[in-house]
């Protein structure tokens, strides 16, 4: 995709983020304790940057729409988790269902079901991984993190198995660094204040953007 196309797609990202903000606030989908999607304009700017990066990386392919949807919705989810330490089920499930629908459409257009099957397997794999942590080590992550793991497994699995591994690894490493940083500047028990969701999302997009062509 050329420079003009990338710039145009970044503008689409701003519009998508603005529309999501309006819908979420209009239908009161934010969790308790969060009346507005704050800080103002930051989600729109981050979404625009991700749209531009995805357009540069993927190009004018049908799967660009699917990953752009993940970017727009992922910024919203990360913002919410960062502010109130919660990933609402009423937001995570619609995001995952629409992403799955977009992948199904891409598979139909390309007449290739292999990436779709791998995406489904990736989702189940990360649901199993996070589910094991959730039940074996209670308190280490919440139900929202478990569902987000499945969502990211779906997105990373479409690419390849390496993306699943690297996206998950990058996310956990980033979260570990953040926890250590918090413990250095605050009390030792303050590590639990660091939300996992934003770092999992960041790790996934590092794998998407730095990995092989989708």
Image: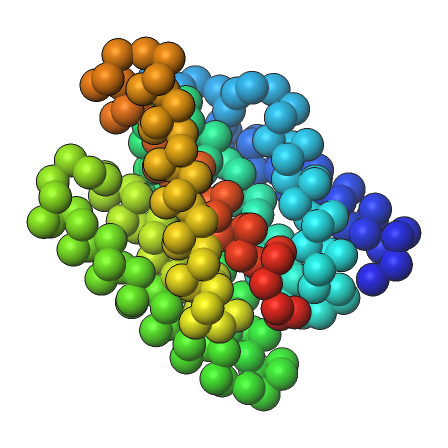
* The residue positioned farthest toward the bottom in the image shown: 111
**In which quadrant will I find the N terminus?**
bottom right
Identify which residue is drawn at 26% across, 12% down. 187
Residue 12 in view: no
* Rendered view: 203 above or below 159: above
Number of numbered markers = 0
**In which quadrant will I find the C terminus?**
bottom right
Residue 213 in view: yes
Q: Is residue 208 left or right of residue 149?
A: right
Q: Is residue 146 left or right of residue 17?
A: left
Identify which residue is drawn at 71% across, 69% down. 61
Q: Find residue 207 and report its horizontal and vertical position in percent.
A: 53, 57
Identify which residue is drawn at 40% across, 53% down. 169
* Rendered view: 169 above or below 32: below
Q: Find residue 51 and report its horizontal and vertical position in percent.
A: 69, 48
* Rendered view: 74 above or below 23: below
* Front-most of residues 200 and 148: 200
* Front-most of residues 171 and 128: 171
Q: Find residue 133 and report its horizontal and vertical position in percent.
A: 18, 50
* The residue positioned farthest toward the top in the image shown: 186
Which quarter of the figure has residue 121? bottom left
* Front-most of residues 43 and 25: 43
Identify which residue is drawn at 75% across, 64% down. 59
Q: Find residue 67 and report its horizontal and vertical position in percent.
A: 58, 58
* Rendered view: 213 above or below 133: below
* The residue positioned farthest toward the front in the image shown: 184
Looking at the picture, the colour scheme in use is: rainbow
């Amino acid at each position: 995709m050329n420079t003009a196309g990338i710039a145009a797609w970044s503008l689409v990202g701003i519009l998508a983020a603005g529309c999501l903000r309006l819908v979420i606030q209009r239908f009161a989908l934010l969790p308790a304790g969060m009346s507005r999607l704050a800080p103002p304009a930051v989600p729109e700017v981050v979404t625009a940057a991700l749209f531009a990066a995805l357009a540069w990386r993927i190009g004018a392919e049908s799967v660009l729409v699917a990953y752009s949807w993940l970017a727009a919705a992922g910024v919203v989810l990360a913002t919410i988790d960062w502010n109130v330490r919660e990933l609402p089920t009423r937001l995570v499930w619609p995001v995952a269902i629409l992403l799955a629908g977009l992948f199904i459409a891409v598979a139909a257009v390309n007449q290739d079901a292999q990436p779709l099957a791998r995406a489904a397997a990736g989702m189940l794999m990360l649901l199993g991984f996070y589910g094991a942590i959730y039940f074996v080590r209670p308190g280490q992550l919440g139900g929202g993190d478990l569902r987000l793991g499945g969502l990211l497994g779906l997105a990373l699995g479409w690419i390849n198995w390496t993306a699943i591994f690297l996206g998950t690894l990058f996310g956990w490493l980033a979260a570990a660094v953040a926890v250590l940083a918090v413990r250095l500047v605050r009390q030792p028990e303050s590590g639990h204040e660091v939300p996992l969701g934003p770092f999992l999302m960041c790790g996934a997009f590092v794998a998407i953007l730095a990995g092989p062509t989708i």
